[in-house]
Image (cartoon, rainbow, N blue to C red):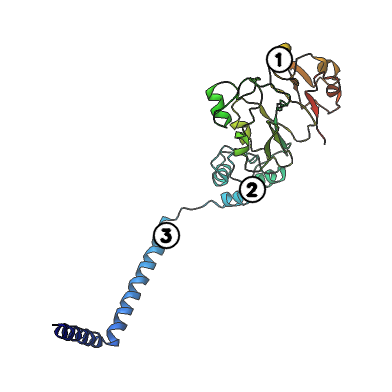
Amino acid sequence: MFILNMIEVSNGIIGLSAIVASISLKDIGIATIVVSIIGLLIGLFLGVAAKKLEVPVDETEEKVRELLPGANCGGCGYAGCDACAKAIAIGEAAADVCPVASSDIHVQIAEVIGSAVEASEKMVAYVNCAGTCEKSKVNAAYYGPRDCKLAAGIGGNGSKACSYGCMGFGSCVKVCAFDAIHVIDGIAVVDKDKCTACTMCVAECPINIIEMIPHKARTQVACSSNDKGKDVKTVCSIGCIGCKLCVKACEYDAIHVEDNLAKIDYSKCVNCGACVKVCPVKVIMEQPA
């Protein structure tokens, strides 16, 4: 029986060999030519279709896109640099809408679209809080999510007693694409040399204690509390008490107390440091130039 099976297998192999042998080189050549022609036709069809379906790109838009920094941070209010370039090219957005681009770039973009733009002052983010772990009192133990927006939604201000102070969970850090903000000793601190003024941290902060100030500003009020002085002192050793000594010391009318909180008018401030010297709680700080 085994021998018969072997004979049948041998016959099958012989038959297959005969079929393969019957395929001539001519047949292989014809098949190759047919496949090549089909491939060529498909390629031509795709090429024509691509031309027909091609979306025309505005030359102005391309030039504007080349000038934009490519950060795709969304600080301009658009989905990314491509969308921003398109908006500028069609006149929907101003030439200086990109907060990351420098004043020189804004001028170049204005030249491309045939408009004019004044060189704007460089701005940076600043966190109006100095309530570090040592200075800000703890109200309760917090075991919730380490996210400012979620913590604010739960209620309270994390573990800190001051409802105006930085929670220190770093939601602003997560949205910064430029590594310009970090949580240090319980509060967010901005590296102004890295900050591009994209304003993403400003939008992310649920208690609105981050603001944009001029890069050249050296004097800041590191507090956001609107509580009265005695209430501020119960939750933070460095909070503004609204004493108005800074107002009296300023010769340039550049600082006023509004709703129990000292605020600086940077259009008038000359960084003289008089307010810094008289502040009894040292919440008005002077940064190096």
Dot label at residue 111 = none
**Observer-nearest of 165 and 124:** 165
Residue 258 on image: x %, y %? 72, 15
Nearest to the eye among marks 3 and 2: give it.
2
**Observer-nearest of 162 and 25:** 162
Residue indicated by mark 1: 234
Among all residues in the image, which is located at the extreme front? 1
For the residue carrying disc 2, how many other residues have a C-alpha within 10 Å: few (<14), some (14-19), or many (20+)?
some
Name the residue rendered at 55%, 47% in the picture.
Answer: 82
The kind of residue tagged 2 is Pro
Residue 186 on image: x %, y %? 68, 30
Q: Earlier in the sequence, mark 2 or mark 1?
A: 2
Q: Are marks 3 and 1 in contact (CB under 8 Å)?
A: no
Q: Secondary structure at mark 2?
A: loop
For the residue carrying disc 1, how many other residues have a C-alpha within 10 Å: few (<14), some (14-19), or many (20+)?
few
Horizontal arrangement in the rendering, residue 108 relative to residue 272 (left or right):
left
Residue indicated by mark 2: 69
Q: Earlier in the sequence, mark 3 or mark 2?
A: 3
The kind of residue tagged 1 is Thr
Q: Is residue 75 visible?
A: no
Distance between the alpha carbons at the discs numbered 3 and 2? 30 Å
Q: Are marks 2 and 1 in contact (CB under 8 Å)?
A: no
**Observer-nearest of 185 and 141:** 141
Distance between the alpha carbons at the discs numbered 2 and 1? 46 Å
Residue 217 on image: x %, y %? 78, 32
Residue 178 on image: x %, y %? 65, 43
Dot label at residue 50 = 3
Horizontal arrangement in the rendering, residue 84 relative to residue 99 (left or right):
left
